[in-house]
Image (cartoon, helix red, strand yellow):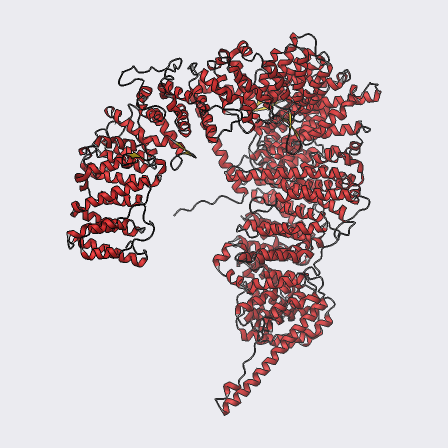
């Protein structure tokens, strides 16, 4: 076996041989002499590198050892010893064949071995594998331990210690895996021995097994534990399962949780300890708690557990060893060990300290005593670490420890200190001694020495160790170690600068410095040890090194600040005695320090709070005024920076305040230059930061500055007041102080300022800060009024022509430097009210200072409606729209506006561009205005515009990415990206304008070139160098930005960005466009490969937009790119669908161009658009229809998987191609795919596809602009004539061949088959049917019948022939064409009429089925003949038609034709008995049919029958009574049909006939007007009755009035209601003036009914309200028709009734509405006269109070809508004006009265006032219910409109408090969910009040009401809190009641939403 090469065949032979040997040994068939050679053979099999032989060889060897151990064991032991030695030595084994030969005594075996030749080389199995196999053999024979156990144990110990013949071999030279595998086999062999204690070396075996527990391999640990279990240890057996779980990597976490190790830990054992029966039943038995580890077992078990866990505490190269998340496991282990008693951790520290301390001294260092001398245990350190172990450690032994071992020890100590500090405390002295002597890498660091990574790592870990020690044991003193540590630290600190340059974080030695400085105990070393000053010096020197990371500097400042806090001022000065000035200089330099980034821009260093705090500390050391000034100037430069970190600014301001306060102890004050510099900086800060805390600190700085500067002293008080903060509430503004300061700043105050540049600048900046605050209306109004006073003062000062030394000394100098820049910055605010304030200031600037701001002056106008600035930010959208239109016209003709285009106009227009709601189309108007201003921009301005738009695009793109991330995290998304699309739209418009300007002179076909406009950019385009710069900018800046955002994610296109890419490319030169365009198109086309359906849909939309932008000339290239991208698999389906989308977009654009929706100069026509691309499109479309794609489309799974595979869009593509090609040149080429497949297409599927193509072509043919009617008729005539001729020729040929075949068959039967010719089918009828469809469509839609009668005449005879075709389709289409030709009155139609009718009769009799399409075509042809010709059918044919065609009139497929035919018969008056019978049937169908279409057709037929057919009077009445009888039909649809039929009859019948049958019509309709239960039916009845009254004569109308009067006189309520309705219908029908006298007589009856019925309190759903409602409606109609006057006595009487509660507060909403409308009409007509005396006024106030109360109560109702609210508001305004007039009269008479009186059990105002009405109305605004939105808007409208309708000066004082309270409620944070309608109404109220009372008074009132509301809310909260304490039960009930109300409200809102969405929710059906 060893000699031969192992193959599959030879291995099978060897296995068979071994199997035979095994069976022979088992059956005892072999002699004992063969056992040794067989054993040698099996050992030789192990050396063969074929593992399949090893298992059977192992079996054989085991059998041999069991049978004859004496013969086999010596050889096996010798082999085992040899292989183990070879494994350790690593040499090739010696050849064993000679010994094998000597052992053989049999002749034949000797001969075989003599023939054997050893193979060359030693290419066998390695010694380790052979050793493992031998051990496996021995493990199967447990008896070997009883015979040779001592020998095996000796070999095992040698293997564990890696000894060969007494010499130790290094483990690192061995293969770790091979040694571990051998050890595992040895442990398997040891586990077989059941009595290990009988062996001689059993104690050594126990020690070795304990040592193996620290092995890193869990399998070896488990096997070693299993071997230990064989020693029968009493402390081990109860916990073996847990220990095995600790060895397993998968179960160790669970065991650590379930097996607690700390002392006194208890567990609850639940299973396994019950009785036998209980265990069998699976019941769990609960026992009392027991110890997890028994106290008597802990001493021996805990060290063993620590040894098991120890390998998992080590760290490897890449972190923690082991698999899985071992970092967490290591933490868990440390936490578990931390629960042990300190003395139980001795074994752990022995394992950790073993590499560093000799074994003889280990107990002394760990336990604190030596066993020989018996020293006492070292006590736990209480205050200091003694360090008495330093002298006992062998330093030479310590130096021999490898560096990696030192690093691992220090890392382990760091973790132990972190997780178990209390346990480490007992061993802290020993650990610190070892760590101190180890040092920082155990090497000195020289200047030129290059440190290795290992040394750097140990230094880092050592520093980390000491950081951890000093942090955890802050209260202990380590003074004994500091001299050694400082000697080691100082060299490292000296090289800290070089190390910091290469690090992005602070070095470890600096972190150690920070920790030492943080402790008061440890920081004393800087005072005690002079050598520590070197460490401080090295640390401070880091501040002056450039290139060090900023975090390092921050840590230095933080450490020094901590050192100051730890040492105190005196010790700190002592420690830093020589470095204070250096430190101060470095700190001052860092305030203004800057760096240059990679782009060349200057960037300031970030200054932290620690640096500022350090400066504040060191400021006390400054003794010179110059130093103070320099330091303050440095602070001013620092505060100038634009920083995002407000905390640093706050700290800087605090430091600046401390510095200013420190000037008090120095003589003199600050110079004016320094003050001006500080004021300038503080002014900018005051305008930038709106934080309340920041404002409070800023006020402190202003106060301190006023103390040290006499120039600023006068304005410091105002600056402090404008930044005042309340002291009683946290971070709350002091409104009273701030508003008082605003009031103080009048015009004289501004004029009195001597240095406005210093004194007024901070005030103005603060005002603009408050003006930009969108949430604080009071301060905003106050600041606006203050700025307006400044502008007025500046204007007055300008008019007085005050002389000044410079422009800075006058107020007008502030306008361009302070006012105008702040206004421009405020225009970018997102708040509409803030923008309105700033635009108003712009208007004042432009109107008051035209010389200084000429461009703004162009936007102003004396007329308010024409002023652009006053209307462009208006609340009313129509005024904004007009302003935008004016601005567009102004921009087109005023180049001067280009100076303010970017700063002013662009910020104003952008909010409208970005408006997602786009109310009133303002977004498009803003974009057009934006486009108009581009023409006059210079190239730098245009580039700045593009920069701003691209920045907006990037910002919106980032917001879209954030939305996607939030959606991925299931967070609520933001608003849609409509703003993003708007920005792209603006970019497209701007770039489009740019392309028009630059490319129009070059002859661009679609551009509009205006030589008068486009001055700036057109001049730039003429300059070649500037034009090159423009192209470079677009190519380098704009195009990359757009390309970067082309994909929203991995596969979703941004459509607007893609279109903008194409726009940019069109602006570039042609060669650049051709170079860049393919990449854009390819990127778009590649996205079409996506599997996502939505992505493909969006991409197609993008592609169509690009196609439209490029035009049809680019279509061939686009098709080529798409076809190359979509070429396989599912992409082919996408290809056909996409091609159709590209073609369809041109059709859509052509339609929009025809409708005038496109603004392009040249119309977009389809003529010849696809001529160039037709040759490329036809093969692709043909493949999509006839190729494999069509077969895949029929598979359901494929069709369901994607939208493109469901339908074939190539048919529609053929239609579009037929529409867009040149007809005469390309149409026959378009038909080529069909004609080429006609002869070979015999399959049904192909025939269907051909018909589909032809049908699509026929639909697109008529939309082709190049196809005239004559051209189409020529095509039709040619195809039909060819088809008919060919068919008849084939028919004749077939018949002649058939006769020939018959003759031949008569003579001989054999020759018959050869003579018969098969008829050739060419499917020419497809083209014939196509032509007929074209002709039918053209005739039906009047396309081919205009001035073409001469060409249509010959077609009639051809069509008559085609009607007899054998193809049903051709016959039907021919008949259809004949039907369309008959109305044209062609002479050929009359000539062929009889022939056509006879042919139709023949076909009808042949078909038989009336519902077939051919039969329907024949019936339509006969109908057309009856209508359009003089043909009269024979009587028998007419009877045949009536029986044949009218069998089932309700059949949907035949009813249209049948009814048309019967109408034709009736119109021609073909008298027949069957016609009358058919009419009776139709009358029944009119009512009983369920089909609306059938009922409509029946109505038409009956109308014709009644009007045209011969009818007698009795027959007519019989039919009418039958129709009236259907009024009582059961179902509503039938009754509606009957009512509609009656209405039609009334409108069509002559007046004489209606008068004769008036009562026959009148009474049924009147009765159903009341009795019909359906609302729709009653509407139909009312319409019919109104038509009857209008169409009849005077006698009938008078009769109707008489009937109504009689009904009113009677006592029947139903008849009275009916009379009211009929009278109202008469008034509506226009009979009011004609019957005015008669109808006016009924008015007293209406008033009496109102007087009687108004007192009846019936439910809203009853019938009592109907009489009142209809009576009121009738009176309202009379008033509208001027039949009665409001001053009539009857109306005056009714006014009193209406003003009462019975009608205005009626239960039914309809009554309340009509009452309010009537009241408004009466009040508008002046029915309430003004009072002339105090008595009349006092009596009038009583009625007005009741009326006002009723109107306010109407506003509180839940069912009010917008219309009703508008009526209530108008009524309230009129009533309020009368109340105001009455009180004016009473006040003139010195009248006094009480106001609050209650009566009738309800609280009312006996003498109402305007203030009371305002308070009551404003109370409705606080309601937050959804149904109260209309009421809230109405209340705000009343408050806004009432002062303008009455005297403004007096009424506004009464309304202002209530209106301000309403505005506070709406603007509060609690009303954040207020609807937009309410906010809009509130803005209108605010602007109205502000214009009436002024901004200042409005702001003060608003602030006062806000304060009152806040106090009220706080009082209510306090009361609720007090009630919760005093009466918790009542408070709980209140909470439950509130919860119940919230649930009810939520339920009601859900129901309202369901009703709004279309009915109640569908309830779940239960079985």
Q: Is 1244 situated above or below 11?
A: below
Quarter that holds the N terminus: bottom left
Image position of 1725 (left or right of 534): right
Q: Position of residue 506 (x, y in %)?
A: 53, 25
- Please state which of residues 1807 and 691 is positioned toward the viewer in this rendering: 691
Q: Quadrant of residue 151?
A: top left
Q: Is residue 956 visible?
A: yes
Q: Is 209 situated above or below 682?
A: below
Q: Position of residue 1849 (x, y in %)?
A: 73, 23
Q: Quadrant of residue 438?
A: top left
Image position of 1247 (left or right of 306): right
Numbered disc total: 0
From this viewpoint, which residue is outermost toward the bottom?
Answer: 1307
- Please state which of residues 988 and 1882 is positioned toward the viewer in this rendering: 988
Q: Position of residue 1361 (x, y in %)?
A: 63, 76
Q: Quadrant of residue 635?
A: top right
Q: Is residue 1344 visible?
A: no
Q: Position of residue 570 (x, y in %)?
A: 54, 9
- Please state which of residues 853 and 619 is positioned toward the viewer in this rendering: 619
Image position of 924 (left or right of 1560): right
Q: Is 660 situated above or below 1833?
A: above
């Amino acid at each position: 076996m060893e000699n031969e090469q192992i193959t599959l065949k030879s291995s099978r032979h060897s296995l068979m041989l071994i199997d035979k040997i095994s069976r022979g040994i088992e059956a005892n068939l072999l002699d004992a002499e063969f056992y040794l050679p067989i054993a040698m053979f099996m050992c030789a099999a192990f050396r063969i590198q074929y593992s399949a032989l090893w298992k059977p060889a192992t079996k054989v060897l085991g059998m041999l050892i069991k049978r004859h151990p004496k013969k086999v064991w010596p050889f096996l032991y010798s082999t085992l010893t040899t292989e183990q030695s070879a494994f350790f030595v690593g040499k090739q084994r010696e050849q064993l064949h000679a010994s094998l030969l000597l052992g053989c005594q049999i002749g034949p075996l000797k001969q075989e071995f003599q023939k054997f030749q050893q193979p060359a080389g030693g290419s066998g199995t390695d010694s380790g594998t052979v050793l493992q196999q031998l051990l496996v053999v021995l493990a199967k024979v447990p008896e070997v331990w009883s015979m040779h156990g001592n020998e095996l144990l000796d070999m095992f110990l040698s293997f564990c210690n890696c000894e060969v013949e007494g010499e130790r071999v290094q483990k690192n030279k061995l293969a770790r895996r091979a040694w571990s595998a051998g050890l595992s086999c040895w442990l398997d062999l040891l586990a077989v021995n059941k009595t290990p204690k009988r062996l001689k070396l059993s104690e050594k075996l126990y020690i070795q097994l304990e040592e193996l527990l620290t092995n890193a391999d869990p399998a070896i640990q488990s096997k070693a534990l299993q071997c230990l279990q064989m020693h029968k240890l009493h402390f081990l057996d109860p916990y073996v399962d847990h220990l095995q779980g600790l060895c397993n990597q998968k179960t160790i976490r669970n065991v650590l949780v379930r097996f607690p190790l700390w002392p006194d830990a208890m567990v609850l054992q639940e299973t396994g300890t019950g009785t036998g029966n209980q265990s069998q039943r699976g019941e769990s038995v609960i026992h009392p708690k027991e110890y997890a580890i028994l106290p008597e077992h802990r001493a021996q078990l805990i060290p063993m557990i620590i040894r098991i866990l120890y390998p998992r505490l080590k760290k490897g190269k890449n972190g923690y060893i082991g698999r899985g998340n071992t970092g967490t496991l290591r933490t868990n282990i440390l936490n578990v060990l931390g629960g042990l008693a300190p003395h139980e951790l001795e074994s752990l520290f022995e394992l950790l300290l073993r590499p560093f301390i000799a074994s003889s001294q280990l107990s002394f260092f760990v336990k604190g005593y030596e066993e020989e001398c018996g020293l006492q245990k070292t006590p736990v350190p209480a205050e200091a670490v003694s360090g008495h172990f330093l002298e006992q450690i062998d330093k030479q032994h310590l130096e021999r420890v490898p560096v990696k071992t030192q690093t691992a020890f220090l890392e382990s100590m760091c973790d132990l200190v972190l997780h178990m500090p209390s346990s480490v405390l007992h061993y802290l002295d020993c650990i610190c001694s070892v760590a101190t002597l180890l040092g920082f890498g155990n090497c000195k660091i020289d200047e030129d020495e290059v440190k290795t990574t290992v040394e750097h790592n140990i230094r880092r870990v050592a520093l980390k160790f000491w950081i951890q020690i000093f942090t955890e044991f802050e209260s202990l003193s380590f003074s004994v170690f500091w001299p050694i540590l400082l000697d080691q630290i100082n060299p490292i600190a000296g090289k800290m600068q070089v190390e910091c340059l290469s690090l992005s974080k602070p070095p470890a030695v600096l972190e150690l410095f920070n920790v030492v400085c943080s402790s008061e105990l440890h920081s004393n070393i800087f005072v005690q040890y002079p050598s520590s000053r070197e460490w401080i010096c090295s640390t401070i020197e880091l501040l002056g090194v450039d290139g060090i990371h900023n975090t390092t500097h921050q840590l230095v400042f933080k450490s020094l600040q901590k050192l100051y806090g730890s040492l105190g001022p005196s010790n700190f000065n002592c420690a830093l005695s020589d470095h204070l000035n250096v430190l101060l200089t470095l700190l001052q330099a860092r305030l203004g320090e800057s760096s240059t980034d990679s782009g060349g821009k200057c960037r300031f260093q970030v200054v932290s709070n620690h640096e500022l705090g350090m400066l504040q500390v060191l400021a006390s050391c400054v003794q010179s005024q110059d130093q103070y000034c320099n330091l303050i100037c440095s602070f001013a430069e620092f505060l100038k920076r634009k920083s995002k970190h407000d905390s640093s600014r706050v700290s800087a301001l605090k430091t600046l305040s401390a510095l200013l306060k420190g000037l008090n102890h120095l003589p003199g004050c600050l110079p004016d230059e320094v003050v001006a510099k500080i004021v300038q900086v503080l002014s900018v800060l005051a305008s930038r930061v709106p934080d309340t805390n920041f404002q409070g600190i800023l006020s402190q700085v202003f106060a301190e500055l006023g103390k040290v500067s006499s120039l600023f002293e006068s304005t410091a008080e105002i600056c402090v007041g404008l930044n005042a903060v309340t002291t009683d509430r946290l971070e709350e503004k002091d409104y009273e102080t701030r508003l008082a300061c605003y009031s103080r700043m009048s015009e004289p105050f501004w004029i009195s300022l001597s240095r406005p540049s210093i004194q007024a600048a901070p005030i103005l900046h603060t005002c603009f800060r408050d003006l930009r605050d969108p949430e604080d209306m009071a301060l905003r109004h106050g600041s606006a009024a203050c700025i307006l006073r400044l502008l007025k003062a500046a204007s007055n000062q300008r008019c007085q022509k005050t002389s000044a030394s410079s422009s800075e000394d006058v107020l007008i100098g502030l306008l361009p430097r302070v006012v105008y820049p702040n206004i421009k910055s405020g225009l970018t605010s997102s708040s509409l009210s803030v923008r309105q304030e700033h635009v108003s200031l712009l208007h004042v600037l432009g109107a008051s200072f035209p010389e200084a701001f000429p461009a703004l002056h162009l936007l102003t106008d004396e007329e308010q409606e024409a002023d652009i600035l006053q209307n462009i930010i208006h609340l009313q959208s129509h005024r904004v729209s007009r302003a935008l239109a004016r601005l567009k016209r102004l921009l087109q003709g005023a180049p001067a506006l280009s100076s303010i285009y970017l700063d002013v106009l662009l910020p104003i227009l952008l909010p409208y561009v970005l408006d997602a709601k786009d109310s009133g189309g303002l977004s498009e108007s803003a974009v057009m205005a934006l486009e108009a201003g581009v023409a006059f921009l210079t190239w730098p301005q245009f580039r700045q515009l593009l920069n701003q738009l691209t920045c907006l695009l990037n910002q919106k793109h980032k917001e879209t990415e954030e939305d996607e991330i939030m959606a991925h995290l299931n967070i609520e998304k933001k608003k849609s990206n409509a703003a993003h699309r708007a920005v792209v739209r603006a970019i497209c418009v701007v770039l489009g304008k740019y392309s028009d300007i630059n490319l129009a002179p070059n002859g661009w076909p679609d551009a509009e070139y205006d030589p008068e406009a486009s001055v700036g950019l057109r001049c730039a385009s003429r300059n070649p160098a500037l034009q090159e710069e423009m192209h470079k900018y677009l190519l380098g800046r704009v195009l990359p930005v757009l390309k970067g955002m082309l994909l929203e994610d991995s596969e979703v296109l941004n459509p607007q960005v893609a279109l903008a890419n194409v726009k940019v490319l069109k602006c570039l030169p042609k060669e650049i466009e051709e170079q860049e365009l393919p990449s854009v198109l390819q990127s778009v086309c590649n996205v079409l490969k996506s599997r996502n359906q939505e992505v493909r849909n969006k991409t197609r939309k993008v592609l169509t937009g690009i196609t439209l932008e490029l035009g049809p000339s680019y279509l061939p290239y686009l098709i080529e790119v798409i076809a190359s991208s979509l070429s396989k698999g599912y992409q082919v389906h996408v290809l056909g669908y996409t091609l159709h989308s590209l073609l369809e977009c041109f059709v859509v654009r052509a339609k929009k161009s025809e409708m005038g929706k496109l603004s392009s100069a040249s119309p977009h026509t389809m003529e010849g658009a696809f001529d160039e691309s037709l040759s490329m499109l036809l093969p692709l479309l043909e493949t999509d229809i006839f190729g494999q794609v069509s077969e895949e489309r029929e598979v359901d799974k494929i069709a369901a998987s994607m939208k493109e595979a469901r339908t074939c869009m190539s048919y529609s593509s053929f239609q579009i191609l037929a529409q867009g090609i040149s007809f005469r040149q390309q149409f026959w080429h378009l038909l080529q795919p069909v004609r080429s497949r006609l002869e070979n297409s015999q399959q049904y599927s192909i025939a269907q596809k051909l018909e589909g193509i032809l049908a699509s072509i026929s639909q697109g043919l008529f939309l082709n602009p190049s196809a005239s009617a004559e051209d189409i008729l020529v095509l039709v005539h040619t195809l039909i004539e060819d088809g008919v001729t060919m068919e008849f020729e084939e028919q004749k040929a077939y018949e002649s061949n058939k006769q020939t075949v018959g003759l031949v068959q008569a003579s001989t039967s054999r020759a018959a088959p050869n003579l018969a010719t098969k008829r050739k089918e060419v499917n020419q009828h497809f083209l014939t049917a196509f032509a007929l469809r074209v002709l039918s469509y053209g005739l039906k839609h009047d396309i081919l019948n205009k001035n073409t009668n001469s060409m249509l005449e010959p077609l009639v005879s051809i069509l008559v022939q085609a009607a007899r075709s054998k193809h049903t389709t051709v016959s039907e289409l021919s008949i259809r064409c004949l039907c369309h030709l008959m109305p044209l009155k062609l002479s050929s139609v009359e000539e062929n009429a009889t022939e056509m009718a006879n042919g139709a009769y023949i076909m009808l009799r042949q078909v038989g089925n009336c519902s077939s399409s051919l039969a329907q075509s024949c019936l339509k042809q006969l109908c057309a003949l009856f209508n359009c010709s003089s043909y009269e059918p024979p009587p028998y044919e007419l009877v045949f038609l009536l029986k044949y065609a009218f069998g089932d009139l309700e059949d949907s497929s035949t009813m249209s034709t049948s009814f048309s035919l019967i109408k034709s018969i009736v119109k021609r008056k073909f008298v027949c008995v069957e016609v009358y019978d058919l009419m009776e049937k139709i009358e029944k169908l009119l009512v009983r049919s369920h089909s609306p279409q059938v009922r409509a057709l029946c109505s038409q037929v009956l109308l014709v029958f009644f009007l045209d057919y011969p009818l007698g009077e009795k027959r007519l009445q019989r039919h009418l009574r039958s129709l009236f009888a259907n009024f009582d039909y059961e179902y509503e649809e039938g009754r509606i049909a009957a009512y509609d039929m009656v209405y039609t009859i009334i409108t069509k019948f002559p007046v004489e006939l209606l008068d004769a049958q008036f009562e026959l019509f009148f009474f049924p309709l009147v009765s159903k007007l009341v009795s019909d239960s359906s609302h729709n039916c009653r509407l139909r009845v009312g319409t019919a009755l109104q038509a009857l009254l209008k169409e009849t004569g005077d006698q009938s109308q008078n009769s109707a009035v008489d009937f109504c009067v009689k009904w009113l006189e009677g006592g029947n309520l139903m008849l009275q209601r009916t009379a009211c309705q009929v009278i109202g219908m008469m008034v509506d029908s226009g009979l009011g003036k004609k019957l005015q006298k008669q109808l006016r007589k009924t008015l007293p009856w209406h008033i009496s009914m109102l007087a009687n019925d108004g007192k009846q309190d019936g439910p809203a759903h009853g019938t009592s309200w109907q009489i009142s409602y209809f009576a009121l409606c009738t009176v309202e109609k009379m008033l509208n028709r001027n039949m009665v006057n409001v001053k009539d006595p009857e109306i005056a009487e009714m006014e009193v009734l209406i003003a009462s509660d019975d009608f205005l507060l009626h239960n039914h909403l309809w009554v309340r509405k009509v009452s309010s409308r009537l009241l408004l009409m009466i009040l508008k007509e002046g029915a309430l006269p003004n009072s002339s005396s105090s008595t009349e006024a006092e009596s009038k106030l009583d009625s007005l109070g009741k009326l006002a109360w009723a109107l306010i109560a109407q506003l509180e109702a839940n069912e009010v809508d917008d219309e009703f609210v508008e009526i209530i508001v108008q009524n309230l305004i009129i009533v309020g004006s009368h109340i105001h007039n009455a009180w004016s009269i009473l006040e003139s008479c010195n009248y006094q009265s009480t106001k609050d009186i209650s009566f009738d059990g309800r609280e009312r105002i006996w003498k109402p006032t305007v203030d009371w009405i305002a308070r009551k109305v404003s109370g409705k605004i606080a309601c937050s219910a959804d149904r109260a939105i209309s009421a809230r808007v109405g209340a705000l409208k009343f408050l806004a409109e009432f002062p303008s309708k009455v005297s403004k000066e007096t009424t506004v004082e009464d309304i202002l408090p209530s209106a301000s309270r309403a505005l506070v409620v709406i603007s509060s944070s609690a009303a954040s969910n207020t609807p937009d309608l309410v906010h809009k109404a509130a803005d209108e109220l605010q602007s109205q009040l502000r214009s009436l009372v002024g901004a200042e008074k409005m702001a003060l009132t608003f602030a006062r009401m806000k304060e009152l509301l806040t106090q009220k809310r706080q009082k209510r909260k306090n009361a609720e809190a007090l009630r919760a304490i005093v009466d918790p039960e009542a408070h709980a009930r209140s909470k439950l009641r509130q919860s119940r109300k919230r649930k009810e409200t939520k339920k009601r809102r859900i129901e309202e939403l369901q009703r709004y969405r279309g009915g109640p929710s569908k309830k779940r059906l239960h079985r």
